[in-house]
Image (tube, rainbow, N blue to C red):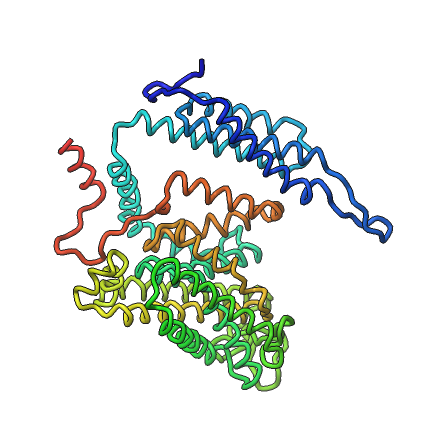
Amino acid sequence: MTAVAPGVRAHTLDIAAVLKESALAALVALLLAFPLVGLRTVDVLSRLTIEPHFAEVAVAVVLVFLGRLGMALTREGRPLPVLVASLVVAASAWFLPLPTMPLKLIAVAGGAIIALRAALALRSHHSTLSLAERERRMDRVGARFQDASRLIGPIAVIFAVALPFLPFADRAVVDIGILLLTYIMLGWGLNIVVGLAGLLDLGYVAFYAVGAYSYALLAQYFGFSFWLCLPLAGLLASLSGLLLGFPVLRLRGDYFAIVTLGFGEMIRIILINWYDFTGGPNGISGIPRPSFFGIADFVRNPEPGVLSFHELFGVEYSSIQRIIFLYYLILVLALFVNFFTLRIRKLPIGRAWEALREDDVACTALGINRTNIKLAAFSIAAMFGGFAGSFFATRQGFISPESFSFIESAIILAIVVLGGMGSQAGVVVATLLVIGLPEMFRELSQYRMLAFGIGMVLIMLWRPRGLLAHRDPTILLHKRKSAMQQQQESEDRA
């Protein structure tokens, strides 16, 4: 007999159907893995030869079979044996001599994910709470963090300001800080469209690209400085958001997402094919670096009549001075985006975005012009994307269409969704997980996307609405109670 977890309603298990389902999944894995993994071309003495890797194919097929079997048994109400078996497989895979390290990581991570899925199924069978009550409890966690963010936020800002001067902060740490702040700024910008207005935008990288190329081309053709190009890049990106918004904002749901995805790809293709203007696939190099507010340059030997930064402040020259200045520049830009978003949420247009997100039909019934508020959300978010793109161009000194592929939009959207749509603090937490952790383990860069995919699966299983999803209205008729007060009242009613 098959062991059944206590409290789980037992029913007849069709072993043949479960094995057939697992075998079919393994067959599909075999058909895909045999040509892609089992037969590899290698260069031997300037000749391409085929090198077989049948052992890797066999292990991959077995792992797929076991994984599908575990998922099927969990679905059929047998989570307890699946939990025990998956933990055993995950632990033993770490010590078994598997053919490659990726297979070992897949086996360990896959076993852990299936064990988590079985544990959640086991807990749901034991729990007497309804799905709505479990969702409310998870929301209270987000509410607690939102309450605590009033204290955590200033502490985080103080830490960010002091970071370049901390003992462990070398150039690599400051560079990672710049990267994190760039994605935080992009996430906060996209959060206006996705989190506040409830519009699924899959082409946000297009505005990022418009801002970057605007600065690069204005500096190349007209000799404009960064401080003049920064607002112009935001203005041009905002204009591109308006141009996109007029024809597509009457669409809804998946149709809207597909059109925004197409817009992002259109911008990338234009940048590749308009060779005479954008440099095509070769990109644009030699983009000017920003000066110290037009007063001094970050160079050791400036041109005659130009003041250098170290001479201005009477300090010794160091190449990291420019990096630290860029760090504080993106920090100020990101904080500006956050401050602007928090303030505009309290204005009528911010409340209109929240109404649109919750119910667009009721929003129209209240007399709100949906097209106008959608255009406002798109243009403002695009402006912030343009600011970030302009900074990216001056930070890198070189841009090309490959820097603005769809994967960038997917990463930014994943940051917003994982953090919890509409949550400013959630964007920061998700950026640290999605961008920060891979940067800390850069030596495992070839497994970065594998870890990213595993993390997405875990979040979808544990917290489908995001880590800190909590969508209270910004303005309430009565003072909002804290999460602790809500929990106390819930316990009193129980």
Q: Residue furthest top?
A: 1
Residue 91: quadrant of the picture: top right
In the rendered image, residue 107, in percent from the top left (x then y), is placed at 57, 33
Rendered position, 62 above or below 206: above
Instruction: Tell which of 289 and 280 is nearer to you.
Output: 280
Residue farthest toward the right in the current orientation of the protein: 45
Write the residue at 52% across / 26% down.
19
Above or below 467: residue 357: below
Q: Residue at x 31, y 63 (%)?
A: 341
Look at the image and tell me in which quarter the N terminus lies. top left
**Residue pictured at 59% horizontal, 36% vertical:** 105
Q: Nearer the viewer, residue 322 or 398?
A: 398
Residue 289: % across, % down: 56, 74
Say whether residue 396 is left or right of residue 233: right
Looking at the rendered structure, the number of numbered marks drawn on it comes to: 0
Q: Dividing the picture into quarters, in which one does residue 491 lie?
A: top left
Query: Where is residue 79 shown, x and y percent of the image?
Result: 42, 25
Q: Nearer the viewer, residue 484 or 430?
A: 430
User: Which residue appears at 39% of the width and 61% of the height?
Assistant: 255
